[in-house]
Amino acid sequence: MTESNPLLAPTGLPRFSAIRPEHVEPAIDAILADYQAGIDAMLASDAPRSYASVMAVAERLDDRLSRAWSPVGHLHGVKDSDALRKAYAAAQEKIVEFNTALGQNRALYAAVKAVADAPDFAALPRAARTSVEHELRDFVLSGVALEEPARSRYREISNELAKLSTEFEEAVLDATDAWSEHVADAATLAGVPESGLAVLRAYAQEKDLDGWLVTLKQPSVQAVLTYADDRALRARLYRAYGTRASEQSDEGRYDNSERIERIVALRHEAAQLLGFASAAEESLATKMAPSADAVIAFLRDFVAKARPMAERDLAELRAFASSELGIETLEPWDVAYASEKLRMRTYALSEEELKPYFPLPAVIDGLFAVVERVLGVGFRPREDVEVWHPDARYYDLVDTSGRVFAGAYVDLYARTGKRGGAWMDVCTTRMRTDDGLQLPVAYLTCNFAPPTATTPSLLTHDDVVTLFHEFGHGLHHMLTEVEVAGVSGIGGVEWDAVELPSQFMENFAWQREGLDLIARHWQTGERLPEALFERMQAARNFQSGLFLVRQLEFGLFDFLLHHRYDPARARARWRSSRRCGARPR
Ligand SMILES: [Zn+2]
């Protein structure tokens, strides 16, 4: 089986073209069995407990699982199918169960504790010590300190939560694919620019239809809500998008309501078993923020400061919509549309005007040039590495001496079967192994509008910022010099700190020097004109008050839901809150 199952290859990059859904479960079964045997053998050994005899052994066993599971999770995200989804869910359940059991293995906990208590612990390198400390913390968080029956109950909850999360995600994906509106008459799409129409035409062609297909995929939602003059169409799309996987759509077929309630209740119960006041407090045990109350106080203070600006933004938008657009009552499906018109009026700046300056190939070249100039890091495309789709590319990262020290898979276009949004994920982690140094490799995934028959993929400036953001995460992972897997790259970084390199990288997409490397008109080759750059800077804070309070509401909602949990009130809280949704972004 080892020869025929690509997921069991001992080294090297994933063989994406060979991986089939039927490989997933046998590979994971075999790896988990070896993993368990390796842990058992290590625990049975009477060698003194040391970093090398305990932690390094566990790290290598864990890395083998990661190297098989990472490509499966990645394919589930970027090239999903019914068969893969089933295989993924089944294997994930096994892995979660295995990890939960491992986290509750008291002999293993004792072995790691013995490493920390050994006299030579203080002499270990900082990375190794931190890795041990994190491990001990995670043992406590996974319920190892609990007595029966709490320990078994905790395990049950973990398994049920994993299953519910997968079902939740699948319902959202299915509900997104289930809705579409076929448009045969061009007049219905008046206002939508040619780039948006091309996307909608491509969706129609995929389904062998003439005309245009409005869908719930990001590029379609963005184009219609921002530009379509047909207010009723915007309203229908907004409702469909905002009620995906709820009791209000698809006759409740993909309704996630019960799952949400169950997830919140189980998280609360699990947190209390571990001795935390709430799931919010538990989540902060691995983060920088000191307490849920501190987070809530911070967010409320922020709301108090941002609210006057948001109210000004909204009042301005309402007045403009009423006097200039004839919209008496501004509804949620009018916000993006009216904003775009107001932005045009105020700054004479539209995303459409900027897009021709951001053809994806030029933006990528510019991004690489920025990284090369600032960090001395080059991206070298490799043609001999297997990928999962013709749109995907692989790059070696090289330093100034030409030494390859990392790799990146880059997959940027939206397509069917690919989860929406933009993200960075780990393929491999830099670490010392039996075969030498394993290099860090990242997946960088976006959902930009694909090229059409006549134009390259043209990005909005928002898209450009997103691309830089995700590459910031990728560079964080790939530029690591640490060789201990637990704290290498983005491993072990607090979640409320992990956005620093990504937000830092965004700045280059706003600076003249950066934009001179990034922006290149796709027809004329011209750089971004100074006047356009100045208007872009002026418009940067356009409606930022509204945007900020929306983000703050997400944060507050999440913390209040998980911190002030009350079974009787939970349902009312998230149901009432959902109505406040603003434009998708
Ligand atoms: Zn991020």
Image (cartoon, rainbow, N blue to C red):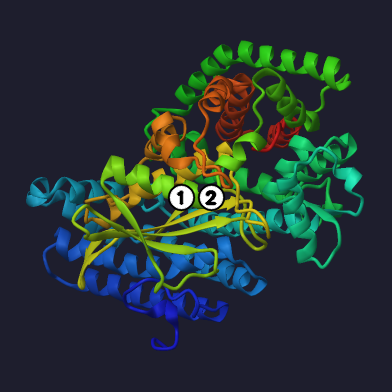
Total label count?
A: 2
Specify the amino acid type for callout 1: Ile
Residue 444 drawn at (x, y percent): 46, 54
Q: Is disc 1 placed on a helix, strand or loop? A: helix
Residue 372 drawn at (x, y percent): 31, 46
> Would you place residue 216 above or below residue 9 in this image?
above
Q: Is residue 581 left or right of residue 248?
A: left
In the rendered image, which residue does mark 1 sit on? 364
**Marking on residue 360:** 2
CB of mark 2 within 8 Å of CB of mark 1? Answer: yes
Mark 1: give few (<14), some (14-19) or many (20+) Cα within 10 Å. some
Residue displayed at 60% across by 42% down: 356
Residue displayed at 14% across by 70% down: 46
Residue displayed at 74% across by 18% down: 317
**Marking on residue 487:** none
Specify the amino acid type for callout 2: Leu
Q: Is residue 143 left or right of residue 209?
A: left
Label 2 C-beta lies within 8 Å of the nearest ligand 1 atom: no
Q: Quadrant of the C terminus?
A: top right
Residue 145 drawn at (x, y percent): 36, 50
Label 1 C-beta lies within 8 Å of the nearest ligand 1 atom: no
Residue 429 visible, this angle: no
Q: Nearer the viewer, residue 116 or 128?
A: 128
> What's the distance in space between the residues labelled 2 and 1, CA to CA?
6 Å
